C-alpha cells in the first residue's frame, strides 16, 4: 500500500495554523495548509473593524517559540491594534517561509477518515482532493460569525457588516446613520470609533457587559528592554499561569476577608492597571457569589460614574450576570460615547427587534432609520469551525453526530472515534479562557510530540478512547460547576446560538494545570489513547 502523499493537512493559517506548519515541517513532515481567507492572520485577517485590538498585553500575546523573533519584533502599544498584529503574523509567515505551504481562499469542506489506509481524505471548495495521515484543525474558536436572524434583512438597502468579516478598504461612516447590534467585546471596541464619525449612531443592546478601561498606551522603551531581557522567565511564568500570561500573581485572600474600605482600595489599584487582571484581585471572585458581587458593584458604580444620563447609565450597568462569568471587555471610551447627543441606546429586552425594512430597523416600539447596519453579534464559538466541515469516519460516526449533545474531546485535543484528527484549542481545553497564543503553542507542541512518538514506534494511527474522553469532559464539567461561569448565558456555553446544546465548553482549571495534565498523559505513553 502506498503511503499518503502528505503527512499532515492543516486547516487555517492564523496563530495556530502557522505555528503548526512551522513545527511539523521542522520535523521533516510534508504539510499542506488550506486557509479560507486571502492571507495569513486568522482573527486578525478578518477583524479589521475600527478599534479592534487584543486585550492581552502584546508582549505576552505573541509567539515564544523563537528567541530571535521575540527579541527582534517591536510592539508599539500595550495592547496592539489589529493592523499591527496582522503585520506581525505576516512577518512570521515570511520569516519562517510558511506562506508557500498555504493555499489561500480555500476552505476544507469535507474530511473522511479511511480506516483501511489510516488516513484522511480531504476535499476543498475549490475542488482539491488530498490525502494525509493527520488532519490538524486549526480553524479557530471565534471564526464562524453569527448574524442576528432578522426578518427583512435581505431587503435592507444599506451596507450590512459583521465585525468578523470587515471589508479590507476603509469604511467611511461620515454623515451616515449607523446601527450597531451587539455589545460584547467587538461592539464595545467598535462603538466609540463609529461614534466619532457617524451622523447618528443607534446601539441595540440585548445584554450590557462589564467593561474595564484598557488604558492602552505606547509601550515604554525601557520597559520593553527590561521585559525582553527577562523574556525567558516571563514566558515560563506564562506557561504555568492560569491565564497563560506572565503578569500573574496568585491571590491568596478572599474578597470577604477584607473590609469594604480595604477592598475598595484593592479594586481601585486593579482598575488603574487597565487589565482583566482586576478579576484576580481575590481568589474567589469567580467562585463565590458574595465575593463576585463586591467587584460587580464596584464596576457598576464606575460605569454609572462615566455616563451623564442616569437612565442610560442604568441600562449599561450589567445586573443579570456576575462579573467575569461572560468575557470581561476592555474598552477605550465606550461608556463615555453615550454622552454624545447623536448616540442612542436601545434596550432590546424592553423592545425586541421585529424586522428590518429597506431603510430602517423596527423594534416593537419604534422605527430607526439606518444607512449602515453593523452586526457585532459574535460567533458560533469553539465548535463552529469544525462542524462547518462535513467530517466523518468512513462507515463510522460523523463529528456532527458525536457532538449532537455538545462538543467534546479528550483534553480538548482529540474527539473519541476520530483517529489522527487533532483539534487546536478544541472543546475541553482552556482555549478562550487564557492567552490563546500560549494555548496554541502548547497544543501544537503536544501534537508534534505525539506525532514524533508515533513515528518512533512505526505507528500510523492514534485515537482517544471513549472512556478517556468521557472522563475528561466530566472533569471539565465538574471544574466549571465549581465556579459561577456556567450560570451566565454566554457563548462559553453555546447560549448565544439558538438550538446549540448547552454545555460549558472551555476548561476553567487554568492553562498551567491543563498543560501539566497534557504532559502527564504523554509521559504515560498517551494514556487514554489507542495507538496502532
Ligand atoms: P483564527 O485566528 O480564528 O484562525 C483560524 C483560521 O482558520 C481562519 O482564518 C479561518 O478562515 C480558517 N478556517 C476555518 N475553517 C477553515 C476551513 N474549513 N478551511 C480552511 N480554513 C479554515 N485571544 C486572546 O488570547 N487575546 C486577545 O486579546 C484576543 N483578542 C481577540 C479579538 C478579536 C476581535 C477576536 C475575534 C478574537 C480575539 N482573541 C483573543 C481570540 C483569537 O481568536 C485568538 O487569540 C487567536 O487569534 C486564534 O488563532 P487561531 O489560529 O486558533 O484561529
Ligand atoms: P459576543 O461576545 O458573543 O457578543 C455578541 C453581542 O451581540 C452580545 O452583546 C449579544 O447579546 C449580541 N447579540 C447576539 N445575537 C443577537 C441577536 N440576535 N439580537 C441582539 N443582540 C444579539 O461577540 P464578540 O463581541 O464578537 O466577542 C466574541 C469574543 O471574541 C469575545 O468574547 C472575546 O473572546 C473575543 N474578542 C476579544 C476582543 C478583545 O478585546 N481582545 C475583541 C473582540 C472579540 P447577548 O449577550 O444577549 O447574547
Image: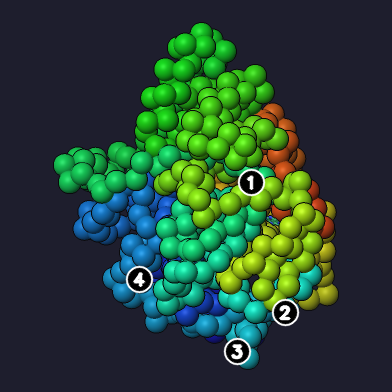
Q: Quadrant of the C terminus?
A: bottom right
| Residue 285 relative to residue 340: left or right | right
The one of 353 and 113 positioned closer to us in this rendering: 353
Please give the name of the residue rendered at 70% of the width and 65% of the height, measured from the top-left corner.
Answer: 361
Report the residue marked by disc 2.
155
| Residue 268 relative to residue 491: left or right | left
Q: How far apart are marks 1 and 2 (CA)?
A: 38 Å
Q: In which quarter of the image is the N terminus?
A: bottom right
Report the residue marked by disc 1.
506
Report the residue marked by disc 4.
90
- Earlier residue among tags 3 and 2: 3
- The secondary structure type at the circle numbered 1 is loop
| Residue 240 relative to residue 373: left or right | left
Label 2 Cα crowd, 10 Å radius (few <14 / some 14-19 / many 20+) = few
- The secondary structure type at the circle numbered 2 is helix
Instruction: Give the percent coordinates (x, y) of residue 23.
Output: 42, 64
Label 4 Cα crowd, 10 Å radius (few <14 / some 14-19 / many 20+) = some
Viewer-nearest of discs 4 and 2? 2
Q: Do the residues labelled 3 and 2 touch (CB within 8 Å)?
A: no
Instruction: Give the percent coordinates (x, y) of residue 405.
Output: 82, 54
Residue 58 visible to the viewer: yes
> Number of numbered discs present?
4
Report the residue marked by disc 3.
126
Q: Distance between the residues labelled 4 and 3?
A: 24 Å
- Earlier residue among tags 1 and 2: 2
Amino acid at each position: 500500500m502506498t503511503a499518503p502523499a502528505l503527512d499532515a493537512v492543516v486547516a487555517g493559517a492564523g496563530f495556530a495554523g502557522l505555528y503548526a506548519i512551522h513545527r511539523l515541517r521542522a520535523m521533516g513532515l510534508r504539510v499542506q495548509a488550506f486557509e479560507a481567507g486571502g492571507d495569513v492572520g486568522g482573527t486578525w485577517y478578518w477583524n479589521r473593524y475600527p478599534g479592534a485590538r487584543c486585550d492581552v498585553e502584546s508582549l505576552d500575546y505573541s509567539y515564544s517559540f523563537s528567541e530571535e523573533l521575540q527579541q527582534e519584533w517591536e510592539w508599539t502599544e500595550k495592547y496592539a491594534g489589529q493592523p499591527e498584529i496582522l503585520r506581525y503574523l505576516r512577518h512570521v509567515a515570511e520569516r519562517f517561509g510558511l506562506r508557500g505551504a498555504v493555499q489561500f481562499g480555500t476552505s476544507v469542506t469535507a474530511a473522511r477518515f479511511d480506516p483501511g489506509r489510516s488516513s484522511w481524505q480531504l476535499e476543498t471548495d475549490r475542488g482539491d482532493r488530498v490525502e494525509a495521515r493527520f488532519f490538524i484543525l486549526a480553524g479557530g474558536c471565534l471564526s464562524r460569525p453569527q448574524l442576528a436572524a432578522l426578518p427583512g434583512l435581505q431587503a435592507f438597502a444599506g451596507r450590512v457588516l459583521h465585525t468578523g468579516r470587515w471589508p479590507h478598504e476603509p469604511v467611511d461612516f461620515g454623515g451616515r446613520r449607523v446601527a450597531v447590534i451587539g455589545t460584547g467585546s467587538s461592539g464595545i471596541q467598535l462603538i466609540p470609533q463609529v461614534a466619532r464619525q457617524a451622523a447618528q449612531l443607534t446601539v441595540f443592546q440585548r445584554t450590557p457587559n462589564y467593561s474595564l478601561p484598557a488604558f492602552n498606551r505606547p509601550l515604554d522603551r525601557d520597559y520593553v528592554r527590561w521585559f525582553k531581557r527577562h523574556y525567558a522567565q516571563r514566558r515560563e511564568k506564562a506557561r504555568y499561569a492560569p491565564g497563560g500570561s506572565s503578569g500573574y500573581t496568585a491571590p491568596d485572600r478572599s474578597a470577604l476577608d477584607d473590609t469594604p474600605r480595604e477592598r475598595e482600595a484593592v479594586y481601585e489599584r486593579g482598575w488603574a492597571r487597565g487589565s482583566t487582571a482586576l478579576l484576580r484581585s481575590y481568589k474567589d471572585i469567580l467562585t463565590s457569589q458574595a465575593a463576585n458581587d463586591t467587584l460587580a458593584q464596584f464596576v457598576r458604580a464606575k460605569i454609572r460614574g462615566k455616563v451623564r444620563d442616569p437612565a442610560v447609565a442604568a441600562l449599561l450597568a450589567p445586573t443579570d450576570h456576575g462579573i467575569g462569568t461572560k468575557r470581561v471587555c476592555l474598552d477605550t471610551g465606550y461608556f463615555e460615547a453615550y454622552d454624545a447627543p447623536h448616540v442612542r441606546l436601545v434596550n432590546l429586552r424592553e423592545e425586541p427587534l421585529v424586522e428590518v425594512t429597506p431603510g430602517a430597523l423596527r423594534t416593537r416600539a419604534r422605527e430607526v432609520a439606518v444607512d449602515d447596519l453593523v452586526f457585532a453579534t459574535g460567533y458560533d464559538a469553539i465548535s463552529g469551525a469544525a462542524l462547518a466541515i462535513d467530517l466523518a469516519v468512513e462507515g463510522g460516526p460523523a463529528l456532527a453526530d458525536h457532538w449532537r449533545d455538545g462538543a467534546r474531546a479528550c483534553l480538548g485535543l482529540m474527539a473519541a472515534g476520530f483517529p489522527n484528527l487533532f483539534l487546536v484549542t478544541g472543546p475541553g481545553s482552556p482555549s478562550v479562557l487564557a492567552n490563546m497564543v500560549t494555548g496554541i503553542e502548547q497544543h501544537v507542541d503536544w501534537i508534534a510530540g505525539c506525532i514524533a512518538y508515533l513515528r518512533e514506534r512505526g505507528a500510523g494511527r492514534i485515537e482517544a478512547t471513549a472512556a478517556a474522553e468521557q472522563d475528561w469532559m466530566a472533569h471539565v464539567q465538574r471544574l466549571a460547576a465549581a465556579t459561577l461561569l456556567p450560570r451566565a448565558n454566554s457563548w462559553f456555553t453555546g447560549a448565544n446560538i439558538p438550538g446549540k446544546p448547552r454545555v460549558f465548553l472551555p476548561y476553567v482549571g487554568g492553562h498551567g494545570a491543563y498543560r501539566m495534565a497534557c504532559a502527564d498523559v504523554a509521559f504515560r505513553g498517551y494514556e487514554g489513547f489507542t495507538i496502532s
